[in-house]
Amino acid sequence: MLFDMDGTLVDSEKLWGVALEDLAVRAGGRLSADARLAMVGTSMPVSMAIFREDMAQPDRPSEPDVAWITERVADLFADGLAWRPGAQELLLAVRAAGVPTALVTSTARRLAEVALKTLGAENFDVLVCGDEVGRPKPDPEPYLTAAGLLGVPIGECVAIEDSPSGVASAVAAGARVLAVPADVALPSQDGILVRSSLVGVDLAFLGALR
């Protein structure tokens, strides 16, 4: 079982939005709604490239911004994260059944480990973070890496995602995909099932996905 984190298990995208808006103010501008939506589900380097373009500051150094926003988000995460509807119940059911489980996130490990205080580190056998893969989502590498670490063929894995970037990664990897959009709409497409939430999703439902 392969879970995305931000927007899938926890409602953390709003906190990322707060931090990015604060960073925009520090940069002397204001983050556009289009730029914020384009960042959802992407890696930090991609998000910062979108940020610089939106601020019309192409030569703005990235490293200080990454360091600042990492600490800002860590502070926001430390106050606790709200679960997405049905997510906690599903995760606990998966673990109770002994299903091998991975957290596959574009977020850096520094922040993922803060989020685990809400999610529970004991609920995951494997953690694959955005700063630990050579090619982050939408490339299939994160999901292929997670399946390999779990020792489960990717075609037997179910991936749960909320963003276009994450869905593309999971589909390209060859996983069965359940998409539960949060901040960005996801149209129905071949190879994925789209639901409005994880409420009512159980092991029998996941087992029937093809």
Image (spheres, rainbow, N blue to C red):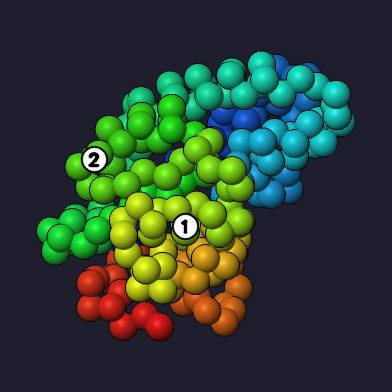
Say whether residue 185 is left or right of residue 162: right
Q: How many residues crowd mark 2 within 10 Å: few (<14), some (14–19), many (20+)?
A: few
Q: How many residues crowd mark 1 within 10 Å: few (<14), some (14–19), many (20+)?
A: many
Q: Is residue 27 above or below residue 176?
A: above
Any part of residue 132 in sight: yes
Q: Earlier in the sequence, mark 2 or mark 1?
A: 2
Rendered-image quadrant of the C terminus: bottom left
Q: Residue at x 53, y 24 (%)?
A: 70
Rendered-image quadrant of the N terminus: bottom left
Three-letter amino acid code at disc 1? Tyr
> Camera-side residue: 36 or 59?
59
Q: Residue at x 41, y 62 (%)?
A: 160
Q: CA distance from mark 2 to mark 1?
A: 20 Å
Three-letter amino acid code at disc 2? Gly
Between marks 2 and 1 in the image, the one whose residue lies nearer the viewer: 1
Q: Residue at x 78, y 25 (%)?
A: 29
Q: Is residue 56 above or below residue 145?
A: above
Where in the figure is residue 94, as x and y percent of width and height?
21, 61
Q: Residue furthest left?
A: 96
Q: In the structure shown, which secondary structural element does the residue marked by tag 2 occupy?
A: loop
Where in the figure is residue 66, as x and y percent of width and height?
62, 24
Which residue, given by chain and number where applicable, does mark 1 sit on? 143
Say whether residue 206 is left or right of residue 185: left
Q: In the structure shown, which secondary structural element does the residue marked by tag 1 occupy?
A: helix
* Label disc, if present, on residue 120 of the rendered structure: 2
